[in-house]
Image (cartoon, rainbow, N blue to C red):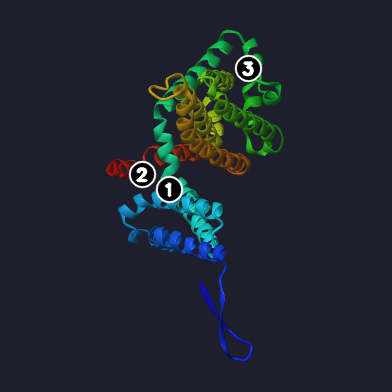
């Protein structure tokens, strides 16, 4: 093969191309011609997807995308092994990177994910573990009843169930006036704030552990819920013994309807993982744990949100609002909101899509 070049004095001449270079050029051209149609088709699909024009990508093209990606990867591998021209290598490397992002890369950004999480993703995950929520709720109610009756039968159980850091004068034998004083807003800077901080810290730890211990077939999670709610049952008995049941429930409801709901969901999430591992069905235990873990993780992200809200409620509304009626109104409104959002929001639309 001869290649013309421009001579020094304007005359054209030809030089002989070495056989090895000529062979490499022909091999590269043949390699490109045989596969270029698939590369161009992949590039065209990627260009439309990268512009956000998903409506212009047909179902057939979406189905063909993984196969075209594998063809491009194979072509790049062959090109590297046979040392094809640098232009072809660069083109294929760029094409494969773009295709990988569309096939395996993240489907959406942070804000898009957050929007999907808040507008349906979280509530769907909670509804997906509804059976575990019912079981956890039953266990929590049972734990409260057990704590009540244990202390009612023997007051020594109160000291076994309620940590000293959380009692602070709220002990059997305290007068009605003393107990009512601990619920007053003017005392919030001392005893009330200490009790609130201890209660929040305890409940946050319980929520994390209830989920983390779910891998042991959910049993530790249920036992933890029983123990934590027995503490609440003991406190309810204490205030009820002095006729302050409504006042204590109102004080607790401002943040408790959010905080205890978060504990309920975390226990249900842990139980969901454990129950799927104990009864995997036709799946392997690892497959069952993986599938249930993804759903439970979404629920736990929501639990973190609820704990943040509960912390805000402890710091401000509960300590600024005086009167049992006002506190109960806030707690009732929050409970209604969580129930409607998690169990009713998007349910009809989801059923219609199914």
Q: Is residue 172 above or below residue 324?
A: above
Give the foreground label among 3 and 2. 2
Q: Is residue 84 visible?
A: yes
Q: Is residue 185 above or below residue 40?
A: above
Q: Nearer the viewer, residue 291 or 12?
A: 12
Residues tagged 2 and 1 counted as in contact (Cβ below 8 A): yes
Which badge, 2 or 1, is on the more N-terminal residue? 1
Place residue 194 in its image quadrant: top right
Find numbered disc 3 in the image and state the secondary structure of the residue it sits on: helix
Spatial distance from mark 1 to mark 3, Cα to Cα?
40 Å
- Could you tell me residue 107's position as x and y percent? 46, 50
Place residue 128 in its image quadrant: top left
Residue at numbered disc 3 = 161
Residue 48 located left or right of residue 192: left
Residue density around tag 2, few if under 14, some if 14–19, many if 20 or more, within 10 Å:
some
- Could you tell me residue 240's position as x and y percent? 54, 21
- Could you tell me residue 179's position as x and y percent? 63, 25
Find numbered disc 2 in the image and state the secondary structure of the residue it sits on: loop
Place residue 254 in its image quadrant: top right
Q: Nearer the viewer, residue 234 or 73?
A: 73
Which badge, 1 or 3, is on the more N-terminal residue? 1
Spatial distance from mark 3 to mark 2, Cα to Cα?
40 Å
Residue at numbered disc 1 = 119
Residue at numbered disc 2 = 346
């Amino acid at each position: 093969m001869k290649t013309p070049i421009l001579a020094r004095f304007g005359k054209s001449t030809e030089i002989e191309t070495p056989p090895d270079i000529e062979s490499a050029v022909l091999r590269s051209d043949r390699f490109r011609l045989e596969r270029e149609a698939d590369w161009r088709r992949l590039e065209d699909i990627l260009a439309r997807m990268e512009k956000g024009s998903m409506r212009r990508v047909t179902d057939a093209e979406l189905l063909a995308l993984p196969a075209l990606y594998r063809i491009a990867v194979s072509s790049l591998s062959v090109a590297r092994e046979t040392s094809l021209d640098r232009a072809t290598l660069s083109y294929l490397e760029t094409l494969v990177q773009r295709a990988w992002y569309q096939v395996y890369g993240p489907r959406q950004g942070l804000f898009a994910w957050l929007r999907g999480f808040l507008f349906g993703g979280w509530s769907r995950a909670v509804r997906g573990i509804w059976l575990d929520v019912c079981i956890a709720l039953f266990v929590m109610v049972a734990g409260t009843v057990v704590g009540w009756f244990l202390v009612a039968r023997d007051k020594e159980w109160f000291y076994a169930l309620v940590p000293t850091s959380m009692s602070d004068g709220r002990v059997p034998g305290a007068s009605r006036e003393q107990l009512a004083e601990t619920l007053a807003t003017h005392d919030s800077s001392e005893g009330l704030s200490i009790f609130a901080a201890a209660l929040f810290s305890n409940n946050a730890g319980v929520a994390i552990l209830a989920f983390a211990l779910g891998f042991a077939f959910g049993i530790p999670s249920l036992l933890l819920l029983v123990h934590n709610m027995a503490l609440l049952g003991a406190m309810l008995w204490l205030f009820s013994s002095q006729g302050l049941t409504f006042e204590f429930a109102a004080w607790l409801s401002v943040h408790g309807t959010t905080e205890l709901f978060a504990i309920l969901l975390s226990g249900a999430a842990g139980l969901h993982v454990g129950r799927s591992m104990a009864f995997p069905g036709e799946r392997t235990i690892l497959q069952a744990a993986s599938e249930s873990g993804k759903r439970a993780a979404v629920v736990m992200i929501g639990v973190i949100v609820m704990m943040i809200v509960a912390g805000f409620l402890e710091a401000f509304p509960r300590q600024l609002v005086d009167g049992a009626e006002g506190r109960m109104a806030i707690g009732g409104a929050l409970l209604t909101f969580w129930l409607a959002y998690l169990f009713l929001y998007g349910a009809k639309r989801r059923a219609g899509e199914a």
